[in-house]
Amino acid sequence: MYFDDILINRRSIRFYKPDKIEPEKIEQILQNAVKSPTARNAQPWAFKVIDDEKVINDISDCAKEYMLATLAGDPAFMTYKERFEDAGYSLFHHAPLLFVVYATNNSTSAMMDCSMAAYTAMLTATNIGLGSCWIGLSTPYLMTDMAREKFNLPSAEYTPVAPLAMGYAKYPVNKIPVAEKNPPIIL
């Protein structure tokens, strides 16, 4: 696939087939993610790959409960309140893989560097026939000691930056409309 085709075909996928992702594809995503550019070649990342459907669903349920309890008064959160109260709603859209990029330090560039690695992972997923969706709403819960302990997530020295749902898209990507993009603002 040509690079422009990858950019055009990448979508935030919210409907997945239940099929497991092959280990070699996960390895390819990891290997490409670590090729991302970083400030001072710091490479401040670590990755957590979860492919257990029950664990992903449990993390989703706990994250929804956490968000309902902690953000109840936030007007911006009200958009999601009804969805989070729905027991059938999966924060990770029933994806068979949760791929989390963690920052390994608090350097000024770690969040940007890890965001680059996440985007490289998403582009790689597109290139090898997978869909992905960055689930930023799960980040506050993933940062809690409660989540770390319950789900054996990395310790507090690691900061979750980019939780990515991944899997095979349930519907053909070319049938998903392209969101209108604003033209670049040149200053």
Image (tube, helix red, strand yellow):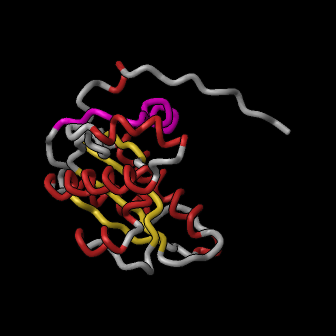
Q: Is residue 111 magenta?
A: no
Residue 2 seen from this side = no
Task: Indicate left or right for 148 with 186 as reference.
Answer: left
Q: Which of the 4 image quadrants contains residue 111?
A: bottom right
- Tell me the quarter of the image containing the N terminus: top left
For the question of whether residue 27 can be seen, the reply is yes
Question: How far across and down, in percent of the image, does residue 181 sit?
Answer: 60, 27
| Residue 3 image offset from top left, x and y in percent | 49, 39
Drawn side of residue 184 relative to residue 149, left or right = right
- Residue at 27% from the left image edge and 33% from the top image edge: 15
- Residue 10 in magenta? yes
Residue 63 vs residue 99, the one in the foreground: 63
Q: Nearer the viewer, residue 95 or 172?
A: 95
Out of 84 and 27, give the one closest to the viewer: 84
Q: Which residue does the image show at 41% across and 63% down from the upper left?
A: 101
Residue 87 left/right relative to 13? left
Please tell me which residue lies in front, 61 or 169: 61
Question: Residue 182: horizontal and vertical position, in percent?
Answer: 66, 27
Q: Residue at x 26, y 25 (%)?
A: 171
**Is 5 rendered above or below residue 98?**
above
The C terminus sits in image quarter: top right
Report the magenta residues as a range.
Answer: 1-17
Q: Residue placed farthest to the front in the image?
A: 73
Residue 115 image offset from top left, x and y in percent: 52, 57
Q: How many marks?
A: 0
Which residue does the image show at 59% across and 67% down from the upper left?
38
Q: Please tell me whether residue 135 is drawn above or below residue 141 in the rendered image.
A: above
